[in-house]
Image (cartoon, rainbow, N blue to C red):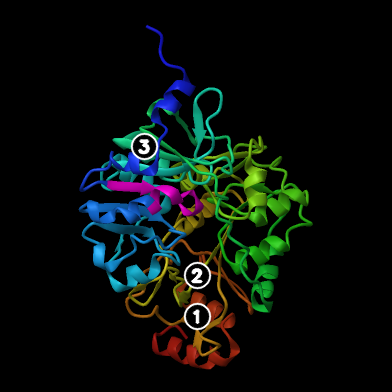
Amino acid sequence: MQRPSAQALYDSKRGTAGDALRLLRDGDTIIVPSGVGEPPTLLTALSKRRRQFRDVKVAQILAMRKYAYFDPETVEHVRHVALFFGGASRAAGQAGWADFVPAYFSELPSLIERGQIAADVVFAMASPMDEHGFFSLSLGADYTMAAVAKARVIMLEVNPNVPFAHGQCHVHVSQVAAVVESSEPVMEVGLPKIGPVQEAIGKYVADMIDDGSTLQIGYGGIPDAVVMQLTNKNDLGIHTEMIGDGIMTLVEAGAVTNRRKTFLPGKMVATFALGSKRLYDFMHHNAMLEMHPVNFTNDPYIAGQNDKLISINASLQVDFLGQCGSESMGHMPYSGTGGQADFVRAANRSRGGKSFIVLPSTAKDGTISRIMPTLTAGTHVTTSKNDVNYVVTEYGVAQLRGKSARQRAEALIAIAHPDFRAELRAAAGKMQLG
């Protein structure tokens, strides 16, 4: 008996979002990709029908849209589980009616594989199917590929605006239970605002990046300010978690060639995308780019095989020992661990690698120092004192690894805002660090 063709399988599984939701059961956990990999048609349909279900969870890093299921009145029906908070989910997390699962980004796939995070259903955006029956989850391979291998039901929202990327990000039609078609543009995310403080920090970091380095660049005004000052560098490589417009700019400027990479030379590697339509078009069948699961991109052992790996990530606070509080305001959650610690450790493993934690020297219009004697009570420690190396503000660079506690305090006070240095020195003295 002849097996049905890929197109016949596709046609048999194509239907409305309402049809797809019939496969959902009470108590299911739905895994949704990072950021713009979230499928709006499926999540909108779930939101409209949320009262038909009980104890359904939607687990995701960085929700982009505040769907109607973000509703404190219906959390017994559908509840958000944040693996990292963003603008859409932050208020719910701070009010306590969305859940939060702390984890390193690189370890989310293994948590799913081991059943420590449930993965009953996958909702994901996907490219159109190719002639061999494969879809590309190019916008978010992340932990979603682990969920694809584990889930009872895979539902794809197939959209012609989603690029077909190379790498380990493909799902065959035979694995899919339901296909819902949509054609709205993929959500675009603009570049963050860059001011003089960000530019100053960016210049300090850019000056320490050599030709031939491989870059991991986080999202934010300061990382983007670094990128803007790298267009004249030569033979840079990319091994990162997020590909955005800044990286595309470096490729177009000729600064990124990937030729001198010591791990996967010639290839850019990322796990999710966040940017403009130009970026998504750039990704489509781009042989230079591979999208891989996050346990490949962010594993410190794998990423650290790149010589001269440069890691650039932002923080909210740094204390005298170098501990970074990058994800909460005191005990109040703000974002999540993400890949910061993953790539700090990877850069430390890398031959010639450098990890940079970047932050403005002050917050709240200059009224609070971000360099602190101790982190604010309750602050979630994102990256440990043993891992942090370079800390950069607009006032300079503090290099910490190999330094004593006293030397660390001195170096960090030297890059604090001048208005706070006297009181920081006094605090260091009381702590026997002055």
Q: Residue at x 53, y 64 (%)?
A: 389
* Dot in front, 1 or 3: 3
Circle 3 Cα neighbour tier, 10 Å, few/some/many (<14 / 14–19 / ≥20): many
Earlier in the chain: of badge 1 and badge 3, it is: 3
Foreground pick, 82 / 432:
82
Earlier in the chain: of badge 3 and badge 2, it is: 3
Q: Along the horizontal axis of the image, is 196 left or right of 270?
A: right
Residue 212 is one of the magenta-drawn residues: no
Q: Which mark is residue 154?
A: 3
Q: Along the horizontal axis of the image, is 354 left or right of 208?
A: left
Circle 2 Cα neighbour tier, 10 Å, few/some/many (<14 / 14–19 / ≥20): some
- The stretch of residues the image draws in magenta is 29-44
Q: Position of residue 376 (x, y in %)?
A: 38, 80
Element class at badge 2:
loop
Element class at badge 1:
loop
Q: CA distance from mark 1 to mark 3?
A: 44 Å
Q: Residue at x 47, y 22 (%)?
A: 6
Q: CA distance from mark 3 to mark 2?
A: 36 Å
Residue beneath disc 2: 315
Say above or below: 405 vs 250: below
Give the amino acid type for the residue marked by disc 1 in the picture. Arg
Q: Which mark is residue 300?
A: none
Residue 32 is one of the magenta-drawn residues: yes
Q: Residue at x 36, y 34 (%)?
A: 149
Residue beneath disc 1: 370
Q: Position of residue 195 (x, y in %)?
A: 67, 76
Q: Can the viewer see residue 33?
A: no
Q: Residue at x 60, y 89 (%)?
A: 418
Earlier in the chain: of badge 1 and badge 2, it is: 2
**Is the Cβ of the residue at disc 1 closer than 8 Å to that at disc 2?**
yes
Q: Can the viewer see residue 311?
A: yes
